[in-house]
Image (tube, rainbow, N blue to C red):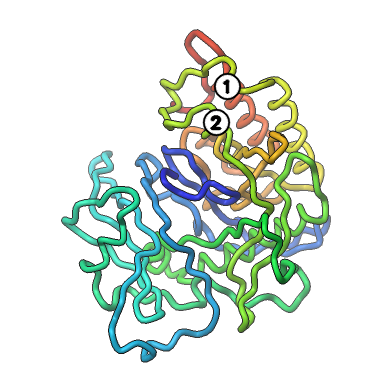
């Protein structure tokens, strides 16, 4: 996502941003969890061929049920902005700007038509054009109550200083509402928390470290807490986010490319050993710690082996669109695509569209 926080959970690939959810609702005896569906929440499956050009100006942590009467003067604060593309005769023209904003302590979603997109760090100038009340986003849509069944854990309080909190994005809330799934984002948050909990119980040096859920004073789950990391593989070797098909790896960008790929593979194989598949291995989902060790991040698309991928978001150009089932091969193919992407010289033979 261009212009986004690229700590765990934010995809910095300029082509598309995808985090997603567990598909289906079934018992997984070997893992001891029940995964819930919230199909396509966190995913960008609607706009897979368009640049996201996404900007987060402020996280919308939830603390208490808001009271619209607290402020006599309505002030609007822009939280999320994304260009909206719709398919028209096989093309994807820009049709508007989606905005999530806070007004009098309440969250709203709206689509602005015929509005010029402001520069990347000046989205707040959209505030005067926003309606006082757009489409209401209730707390249940993004901040579910923390489960009492013990399936997930709370993060330590106070949090360590080196923590990144991955919070849900609501930029496609209108589409979830149209599909009759207004709480899809909240359900996705809990689904990813359950997967992350499995990873916490089975750590690996090449998988991001999870610390538990951020929980508000009134018991709502507002984010997932991870050890903060440095930049991504995408940022390190392709800081201008040049398209996959024309990107050329510059020798020396990585200290030891083969060692890097071996460590990523080790992390992938560990995920498979505990019965899961990441399903979104790409350069933006590999980050580096302070010791320059590569770690796999972003488990919004991670599901148990054998699950349907019908509504799971993945990153355009980095997966096989014909594959509908969560299998270990998905991750290994993604790794081989990264290997080819990093190859020096000559034309490249990608498995997936570039």
Which x, y percent locates residue 320? 53, 34
The C terminus sits in image quarter: top left
Helix, strand or loop at label 1? It is loop
Q: Residue furthest front?
A: 161
In this rendering, position of residue 157 left or right of residue 235:
right
Q: Residue furthest top?
A: 346
Residue position marked by numbered label 2 in the rendering: 236
Residue 253 numbered tag: 1
Which x, y percent locates residue 75? 31, 77
User: Which residue sits at x=76%, y=76%?
Assistant: 149
The Cα–Cα distance between marks 1 and 2, rounded to whole angstroms, is 7 Å
User: In terms of depth relative to the viewer, which is nearer, 337 or 72?
Assistant: 72
Q: Is residue 194 above or below residue 237?
A: below
Q: Is residue 295 above or below residue 172?
A: above
Of the image marks 1 and 2, the number of the one nearer the N terminus: 2
In this rendering, position of residue 102 left or right of residue 272:
left
In this rendering, position of residue 287 left or right of residue 134:
right
User: Which residue sits at x=61%, y=37%?
Assistant: 281
Q: Is residue 277 above or below residue 353?
A: below
In this rendering, position of residue 31 left or right of residue 59:
right
User: Which residue sits at x=49%, y=73%?
Assistant: 141
User: Which residue sits at x=16%, y=56%?
Assistant: 114
Helix, strand or loop at label 2? It is helix
Q: Is residue 300 above or below residue 174?
A: above
User: Dot 1, crowdedness within 10 Å: few (<14), some or many (≥20)?
Assistant: few
Which x, y percent locates residue 231? 57, 39
Residue 303 numbered tag: none
């Amino acid at each position: 996502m261009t212009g986004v926080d690229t700590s765990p959970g934010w995809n910095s690939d300029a082509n598309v941003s995808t985090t997603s959810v567990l598909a289906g609702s079934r018992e997984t005896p070997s893992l001891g969890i029940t995964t819930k569906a919230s199909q396509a929440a966190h995913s960008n499956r609607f706009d897979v061929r368009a640049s996201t050009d996404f900007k987060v100006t402020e996280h919308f942590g939830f603390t208490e049920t808001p009271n619209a009467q607290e402020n006599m003067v309505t002030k609007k604060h822009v939280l999320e902005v994304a260009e909206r593309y719709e398919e028209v005769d096989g093309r994807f023209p820009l049709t508007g700007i989606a905005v999530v904003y806070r007004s009098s302590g309440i969250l709203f979603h709206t689509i602005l038509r015929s509005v010029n997109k402001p520069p990347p760090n000046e989205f707040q100038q959209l505030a005067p054009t926003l309606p006082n009340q757009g489409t209401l986003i209730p707390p249940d849509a993004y901040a579910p109550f923390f489960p009492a069944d013990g399936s997930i854990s709370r993060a330590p309080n106070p949090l360590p200083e080196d923590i990144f909190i991955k919070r849900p994005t609501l930029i496609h809330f209108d589409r979830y509402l149209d599909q009759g799934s207004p709480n899809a984002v909240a359900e996705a948050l809990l689904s990813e928390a359950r997967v992350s909990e499995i990873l916490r119980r089975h750590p690996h040096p090449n998988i991001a470290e999870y610390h538990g859920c951020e929980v508000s004073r009134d018991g709502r789950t507002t984010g997932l807490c991870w050890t903060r990391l440095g930049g991504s593989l995408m940022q390190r070797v392709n800081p201008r986010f040049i398209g996959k098909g024309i990107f050329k790896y510059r020798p020396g960008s990585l200290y030891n490319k083969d060692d890097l790929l071996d460590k990523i593979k080790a992390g992938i194989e560990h995920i498979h050993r505990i019965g899961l598949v990441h399903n979104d291995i790409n350069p933006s989902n590999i980050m580096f710690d302070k010791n320059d060790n590569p770690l796999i991040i972003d488990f919004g698309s991670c599901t148990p082996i054998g699950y349907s991928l019908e509504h799971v978001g993945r990153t355009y150009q980095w997966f096989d669109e014909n594959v509908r089932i969560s299998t270990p091969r998905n991750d290994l193919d993604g790794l081989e695509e990264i290997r080819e992407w990093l190859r020096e010289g000559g034309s490249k033979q990608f498995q997936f569209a570039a």
